[in-house]
Image (tube, rainbow, N blue to C red):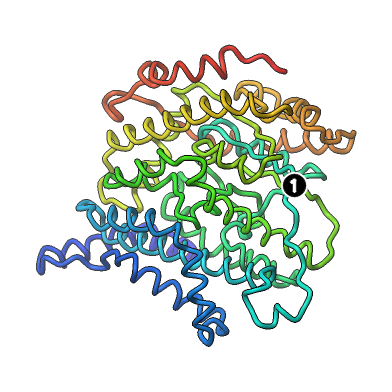
Amino acid sequence: MVLGWLRTLYRRWYRRLVNLLGWLVWLLTGQLLSPVPSPRQLLADALAAVQTTYPELAASPSKCERLLSECEHLHEPLQLLADGWSQDEHLSLSGRRQARANLTGALINHLSCLHVWNSHYAHDYDAENNHRQLPQPPSITQPIFIIGWPRTGSTLLHNMLSHHPQLRAPLLWEVLQPALAAETKSDDEVRRHISNTTNEIEPWFEAEPNLRFMHAMRADAPDECCHLLEQTLVDRHTPIIASSMNAYAEWLYSRTPESMRPFYRFYRKQLELIATRQFATQQHGPSIFVLKDSTHMLFVEALLLEFPDARIIHTIRDAASVAGSCCSGFSLLSNFYYSRVDKHGVARRVMRYLEACARSMNRAQDSLAQQHTRRVFFDVPFQELASEPARCVLRLCNDLGLEWTPTIQATMREKEADSRVEHQRNRHRYTLSQHEWALDDTQARERLVWYTQRFLQTHTPA
């Protein structure tokens, strides 16, 4: 017990001590410790790490060249992210170290996924593949995407739908390392990966305990697929957290559907890797993926180009509640990068993100409604979901053509009761004010009234 308390205390103060060291070195020498490397160096470091994990790559320059060529679509966002972090004068030492780890980790995962996917499914990747019958990748059919602004109840809905026997929600340890998931064969390996993932995420919550109120995470529980997108350097968090990412934000918020196709093609490959373990071990289980992340709001049209049979659940909530919660949450994340958080800047960037998401969803529903004869979008107002979650899930199951039995109903009622207990125990409290955020409820609602009027105030169940 004493050791646990000391470990928690150390993790909460470790970042402050590191930042103090960085400030002292800069004061005495004018040099920054742990600068963010160039994109070329980041890629070289990532490839070296992947070669350590997969020694066969070190002996095959042609495979390495192929992997790097398949990463060409990452060059622009990688350059923008590396430049943004390098030019950030306010970034703390722990922030620079975290930024470097984020970029290197994303590239390592990207290269690892490409290598494992090619080894399983690409006939021209390995000479041995030419002489054996390779299986087709697992089919990703009729996936369900839960998208909407952050803090609109999507996590509650995702967790409840993950218990439906026809649906499969990837677990946190799987979305963090899809390549590892594809090559995991035994239950003992699964337990080891879950334990390792738990050890990776716990220091974040020990350093910032309030993060649990925002988004509790468990290695063996479903989680957002933003982790899959971040491994393609499509990252919604960074342009809100960082004050130096205007160029990257502009790139992210102005993508055309065609320009996003390589990113979503790789996203599909990651889902295929996650499905590979069930396919390879001949396990019979749910076959329809249910996924959720607000980032997809920016790229609805690109998502439907890659998954033309997808169904999209669109969660909606009052703009002031969303903005207040997001400002609070992103300021907590900013503590990992800055010794002093500019809350006014965080609020400006939160509103820019929410507006970009709303514009994209507005445009997508206008254009795609004319292209599809089937129903694509299923709107879920937050009030309906929060007041009667199980009944809301019943409506969605009927709309989506999913079965509903007394057993499923009992499960959903149980999960509804669990969610109410958890909400009371770990309730996230927040307020918007001019003094703290230079933003209040009225301003947030006025800036996004055109979106909420269309999808919230005039909503009538179909």
Q: Residue furthest bottom?
A: 59
Residue 3, image x and y in percent?
Answer: 48, 67
| Residue at the spot 75% in from the left edge and 69% down from the top edge | 187
| Residue at the spot 25% in from the left edge and 60% down from the top edge | 19
Crowding at dot 1, Cα within 10 Å, few <14 / some 14-19 / many 20+, comes out as: few
Residue 375, image x and y in percent?
Answer: 72, 27
Image: 289 above or below 78: above
Q: Is residue 193 left or right of residue 5?
A: right
Q: Nearer the viewer, residue 72 or 15?
A: 72
Residue 248, image x and y in percent?
Answer: 34, 47
Circle count: 1
Q: For residue 293, which quarter of the picture?
A: top right
Q: For residue 45, which quarter of the picture?
A: bottom left
Image: 319 above or below 192: above
Q: Nearer the viewer, residue 295 or 60?
A: 60
Residue 300, image x and y in percent?
Answer: 56, 36
- Location of the C terminus (image quadrant): top right
Q: Is residue 252 left or right of residue 195?
A: left
Identify residue type, mark 1.
Thr
Say which residue label 1 marks: 141
